[in-house]
Amino acid sequence: MPIEFIGYISNNNSSETIVRQGPVLDPTHIEAVAKAHENAGFDRVLLAFHSTTPDSLQVGQHVLGVTGRLNVLIAQRPGFTSPTLLARQLATIDQFSKGRVALHVITGGNATELRQDGNTIDDKDERYARTSEFLDVVRAEWTSDKPFDYTGKYYQVRNGFSQVKPFSREGIRIFVGGASDAAIEVAGKHADTFALWGESYAQVRDVTARVRNAAARYGRPTPRFSLSVRPILADTEEAAWAKAEAILERAAALQDATGYRKPDGRATAGARRLLALADQGTRIDKRLWTEIAKLTGASSNTTALVGTPEQVAEVFGDYYDLGISHFLIRGFDPLIDAIEYGRELIPLTRKLVAERQAANRVAAE
């Protein structure tokens, strides 16, 4: 099972510890971070989606234009763009980039934010039902060799057809995230890769088992699994933990200025899982650190792995043994951390996983 490293490109230089100084859409930052990820050995980068931020489709296309190898994972929310249109948009970009596009489907857990884009469905399970129909239509646009009809509760299509298809026969990979039962059901039916936040070993076992069972109910192969986490690295373990505490102190001091505060309203199922983890302690398993998640209400991937590059690579090896093949990693200093990950963490992890793969092959003979 090959591994993949996924990075993250924000629209400007900001994070929980960095207050944005430049424009909301900063092309210079985007280009620099994109090239840094490509040079650091990342396979792919995520372009996020929010109701108030620049359009991830266009940002993703720009990233593809300034890189030669780097793939993109473009986040989109069902319900705000017609699935037939989005399918053609993504297939067009995929053709221009010769197959470097994947779709990250974000159904969205914050009803207040979703209303900023005109959402009228507040029930999250119902939004996931809409997502499932959305992906039915997207797949049909990508794969149908003749016009098709689709009749659902949320989408009706007559003689739908796309002349432009994804670049490769394998098509455009679909990533699905979420932790609720409704999210797992959608993943079982549609996901090529299922995305988890940085959870404990026990939580990973639980979620991956649920997704495997859901996929089996639909007669589909098990999706691949991605884990999102924030590595905090230093030359010694002591220095890494000191760095983590400094990050926490700065994040707490800058919450008003950065906007990374506990969100209003009900936490998503994924956030509740991370907060439940934080209630168990600040350090989980070998070196999973929960303090930033606790500080911010776990509104995004905010758990960290703290240690030397060798120690964090060892934990990635543990997750790999649990079925994780994709690691979405981003730091609190976006450009510097991406470069740092490429120096040691990424090559060390690839080497460790290759050794485990070889050992498993020998054991199976």
Image (spheres, grey):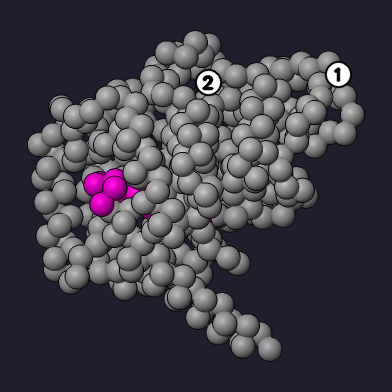
Q: Is residue 334 left or right of residue 325?
A: left
Find disc 2 in the rendering and name its residue: 123
| Residue name at image x 45 percent, y 75 percent | 351
Question: Where, quadrant-wise, is the C terminus in this rendering?
Answer: bottom right
Find disc 1 in the rendering and name its residue: 159
- Cα gap from disc 1 to disc 2, whole angstroms: 31 Å
Question: Where, quadrant-wise, is the N terminus in this rendering?
Answer: bottom right
- Regarding residue 51, the answer to whether it shows in the image is yes
Q: In the rendering, at what x and y percent does residue 125 appear?
A: 57, 27
Circle 2 — which element? loop
| Residue name at image x 23 percent, y 28 percent | 22
Circle 1 — which element? strand
Indicate whether residue 334 is drawn in magenta: yes
Q: Is residue 151 left or right of residue 118?
A: right
Name the kind of residue labelled 2 in the image: Asp
Indicate whether residue 212 is drawn in magenta: no
Callout 1–callout 2 Cβ contact below 8 Å: no
Name the kind of residue labelled 1 in the image: Asn
Q: In the rendering, at what x and y percent does residue 55 appear?
A: 46, 24
Q: In the rendering, at what x and y percent does residue 130 appear?
A: 64, 24
Question: Which of 256 and 209 lies nearest the eye of the viewer?
Answer: 256
Q: Is residue 73 left or right of residue 23?
A: right
| Mark 2 Cα shell of 10 Å, populated few (<14), some (14-19), many (≥20) | few
Where is 213 relative to 130, above or below? below
| Residue name at image x 40 percent, y 65 percent | 346
- Regarding residue 274, the answer to whether it shows in the image is no
| Residue name at image x 13 percent, y 34 percent | 254
Q: In the rendering, at what x and y percent does residue 183 appear?
A: 57, 37
Question: Which of 109 and 46 lies nearest the eye of the viewer?
Answer: 46
Q: Is residue 128 left or right of residue 267?
A: right
Q: Which residues are magenta?
A: 326-336
| Mark 1 Cα shell of 10 Å, populated few (<14), some (14-19), many (≥20) | few
